[in-house]
Image: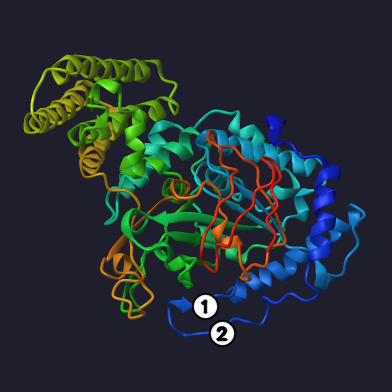
Amino acid sequence: MQAGNTSFSAPVICFWLCIALARAKAMDNMEGNTTTSEKAIRSSRSLCTSEQQYVHKRKQVVLESLSSLGINCTADSVPHITLLASGGGQRAAVGLVGSLYQMEQEGLLDTLLYLGGVSGSTWSMSSIYSDPQWSSSLDTEVSRLSGPGVELEVALAWLGERAKEEHFSLTDIWGVLTSAGIMKQMDLRRLSDEASRNVTNPYPIYSAIEKHCFSSGPIEGKWFEVSPHEAGFTELGLFIETSLLGSKFQSGELLEQMPEMDMVKLQGVLGCALAHEDTIKEFIPPWLKVLGQTDGTSEEYLRVYNGLDKLLALIRSTIKDPTALSDLDKLHKILDDKLKHNESAWLEPQGSEERKRLSQRWITELLAEVETWSESLEDGALKTHVSVLTKKVLPKMMRWEWGTTSNFLYQHQDPMVPTCLRSQESFHLVDAGLLINVAYPPFLGEKRDIDLIIAPEYSAGNMFEVERRQSSLRPTIHITTAVTGCVWQ
């Protein structure tokens, strides 16, 4: 499988490996630095013991791979190499698989110690790791991407179960539709299940950001990393076991252990750029802008309209039944006609209060149209499952609730914890690509001591520019190439 310009040249990568090897430290300074604690929340700038053990064993795989490439080193001087995949939606999900496939073909995949991703690339990460031996053969993953999607009834049955949970949000909807429609898989395992696996694969690190801290909080409360062993805030150095993510905490103590989210929901958490209201502005047509500026009342209406439109498109990708497709076509026409009808009314001169009333009326009418459409469906499984969307999903769209998760830092006494985290029983984890479209923060500084970063770009924008971050975990980043970027400390 080829993936455009995301393929890798063995001589080029070997050249970088030689440089990384030359710069590698004589001893791994990560081991032995972590102090144990019986508290549920770990406060440390070092790796947890379990990740240290995994990495130590993975280095043996890397050592053998380097030796097969003619690069000789000792176990104590194995370079720490990571591949960090950018975001970019479905393009990133498919592109990462293509990049890894090409690395496997050229005998370079086992040189990786870590694999990190944000946004769309985490969709394929969460998918490929369902195979414990994926790094030895990616043929299964390639075949799945080109195969049929998951049946809509299966996807909506999962959604119906999630709708019964306390923290049900739009993230659940986004997760099931991207998992079933794009990745063609409903992976019900938990990320912590990988903690007990062997070291066949690179160690995975997934990234998200906390929505409210992203909007108005300090930099330290933004970046959130999740691995098979731990989950927590990168720059605060506060972590819990991944199996406890979603459990209830207060003042640093575990109150009630809740079930860990499965990989379907995690995909929704990691790749939901729509969770941030500013993203919706990109889809607002010119006629809904007032004097060149986005009108606040138009945002609310377009948030609901675009949410419905994207859900409809993703649902279509999961079904093949002609009758169901015809029903969805009818709904699409209803939405399209409604938007066109509203255009002329919106362009009439009127004050801001009148626009607000008009927008709210349109939202009510739009939801009523969807409800009427759902009731017109023939009795059967599709109608039953669609009722979940109309009764559970649409109210979440009105409130725009994404990524709701129990906050393990609620009322935490550490003064380093920002108020935006300490004061709320829940926080909201969303797409990290909204802040930085590549997962640098967990891999800079001494914690993972990375010598070489390989950074394939799948984003639509110009991701590879100089980034300057003034913090201990984010020194100045220099990106040297759009395919293989090196970051040296």
Q: Amino acid at mark 2?
A: Thr
Indicate the secondary structure of the residue bearing disc 2.
loop
Question: Observer-nearest residue: 357 or 266?
Answer: 357
Say which mark, if any, is on residue 44. Answer: 1
| CA gap, disc 1 and disc 2 | 8 Å
Residue 340 placement, left or right of 436: left
Residue 373 percent location from the top left of the image:
21, 22
Question: Observer-nearest residue: 277 or 1?
Answer: 277
Tell me the crowding category of disc 1: few under 14, some 14 to 19, or many 20 or more residues within 10 angstroms, Cα based: some
Residue 317 percent location from the top left of the image:
45, 26
Residue 254 percent location from the top left of the image:
35, 76
Query: CB under 8 Å between callouts 1 and 2?
Result: yes
Residue 276 percent location from the top left of the image:
34, 44
The quadrant the C terminus occupies is: bottom right
Residue beneath disc 2: 35
Residue 246, quarter of the rendered image: bottom left
Please tell me which residue is depicted at 77% across the width and 55% down the height of the picture: 111
The quadrant the N terminus occupies is: top right
Residue 378 in view: no
Check the image and report above or below for 464 versus 403.
Answer: above
Residue 189 placement, left or right of 31: left
Mark 1 vs mark 2: in front? 1
**Number of dots carrying numbers:** 2
Q: Amino acid at mark 1?
A: Ser
Check the image and report above or below for 478 versus 278.
Answer: below
1 or 2: tag closer to the N-terminus:
2
